[in-house]
Amino acid sequence: DGGITQSPKYLFRKEGQNVTLSCEQNLNHDAMYWYRQDPGQGLRLIYYSQIVNDFQKGDIAEGYSVSREKKESFPLTVTSAQKNPTAFYLCASSLRDQPQHFGDGTRLSIL
Amino acid sequence: GIQVEQSPPDLILQEGANSTLRCNFSDSVNNLQWFHQNPWGQLINLFYIPSGTKQNGRLSATTVATERYSLLYISSSQTTDSGVYFCAVDPYYGNNRLAFGKGNQVVVIP
């Protein structure tokens, strides 16, 4: 089936650690996005990529990093510089100027 | 950046009732999407509607781009309609970067 796969569903991080969230899509979409959702809030854009080997910062990029080496994959690293990483992270993809479709998300918590 | 405001923030419905959710936005947009987030956090596409009216079963949506608002109608509500409804817009300068409202929390009681 075509879709967007995020893994893991739940992730725990110790203080000072970097962690990487996976996002893979087999929809042949050019663009991919990472959003963060805090309780009771809407989603906020962290990073996005419109083509392979290129990506741009969103509204809340500090403390995060991404790569886009393959069209299908857009991993997000939450670095130790992100002081409040506990949140629900959602990945999306789309064709140019078409609706965005979302994965099921990863819940990140700090131990 | 663009502001997206949704109202009402919370809504409790009796099963079978109808309701209207509203999304106001502060600038011109290239597109607008409505999503339903279920209790497990999954975000489901409902409508991609930069302008005009669309219907899908018991749900319909209307966007009046010139007046910068969109409406989502739920008719004959069911308990499975419970969840949070999000409006998200792509500003005309946005390169398909979505700006989300804070959502409408809907609870449908039997």
Image: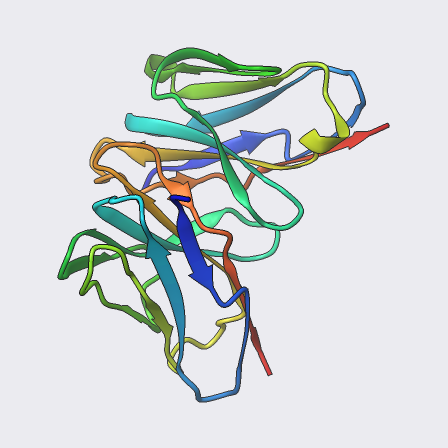
Name the side, left or right, on which A58 lies relative to B99: left
Of A82 and B24, nearer the camera is A82
Residue B87, position in %: x, y? 47, 33
User: Which picture quadrant has residue B19?
Assistant: top right
- Residue at the spot x=50%, y=13% of the render? B55
Count of numbered marks: 0
Quadrant of the image containing the N terminus of chain B: top left
- Residue at the spot x=45%, y=50% of the render? A103
User: Which picture quadrant has residue A5?
Assistant: bottom left
Q: Residue furthest right?
A: B110
A15 over B101 or under it: above or below: below
Residue A88, position in %: x, y? 53, 60
B89 over A54 or under it: above or below: above
Q: Residue furthest front?
A: A1
A56 over B73 or under it: above or below: below
- Residue at the spot x=64%, y=50% of the render? B40
Name the side, left or right, on which A36 lies relative to B58: left
Quadrant of the image containing the C terminus of chain B: top right
Of A68 and A44, nearer the camera is A68
Q: What's the image's color scheme?
A: rainbow
- Residue at the spot x=21%, y=63% of the render? A68
Name the side, left or right, on which B78 lies relative to A1: right
A68 over A4 or under it: above or below: below
Residue A100, position in %: x, y? 36, 39
Name the side, left or right, on which B57 lies relative to A60: right
